[in-house]
Amino acid sequence: MRYPVVAVEGIIGAGKSTFCEFIERRLNLYRIPEPVEDNPYLDKFYADPPRWALQMQMWLVTRRCQA
């Protein structure tokens, strides 16, 4: 069986997670949450976004592909 995929994109702090949680409950969908607990770049990114943005995004992309 094939299922639709909905991707939500936006800047950090825009409310993507909150929106996805709402849509998940409202439409009874399966959500793949953003892996933030074990993200080794998140603190570094907040301290120096231009320096760590690419590394953090690449880490997030590879984690999503593993899900």
Image (cartoon, rainbow, N blue to C red):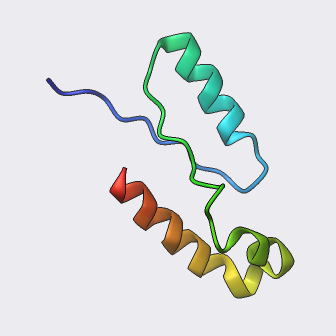
Residue found 57% across the figure and 53% down from its top: 35
Residue found 44% across the figure and 61% down from its top: 63
Residue found 54% across the figure and 42% down from its top: 33
Q: Is residue 3 left or right of residue 24?
A: left
Residue found 64% across the figure and 55% down from its top: 36
| Residue sticking out furthest to the right | 47
Q: Is residue 60 left or right of residue 67?
A: right
* Residue 38 place in picture, x, y as percent: 61, 61
Instruction: Judge whether 53 appears above or below 62 on screen.
Output: below
Q: Is residue 32 left or right of residue 20?
A: left
Instruction: Judge whether 11 appears above or below 27 on screen.
Output: below
| Residue sticking out furthest to the left | 1
Along the viewing direction, whichever of 21 and 66 lies nearer the viewer = 66
* Residue 59 place in picture, x, y as percent: 51, 71
Q: Which quadrant of the structure image shows residue 26?
A: top right
* Residue 9 place in picture, x, y as percent: 58, 49
Q: Is residue 45 left or right of residue 17?
A: right
| Quadrant (top left/top right/bottom left/bottom right) for the N terminus | top left
Q: Which quadrant of the structure image shows residue 18?
A: top right
Count of labels in the image: 0
| Residue sticking out furthest to the front | 38
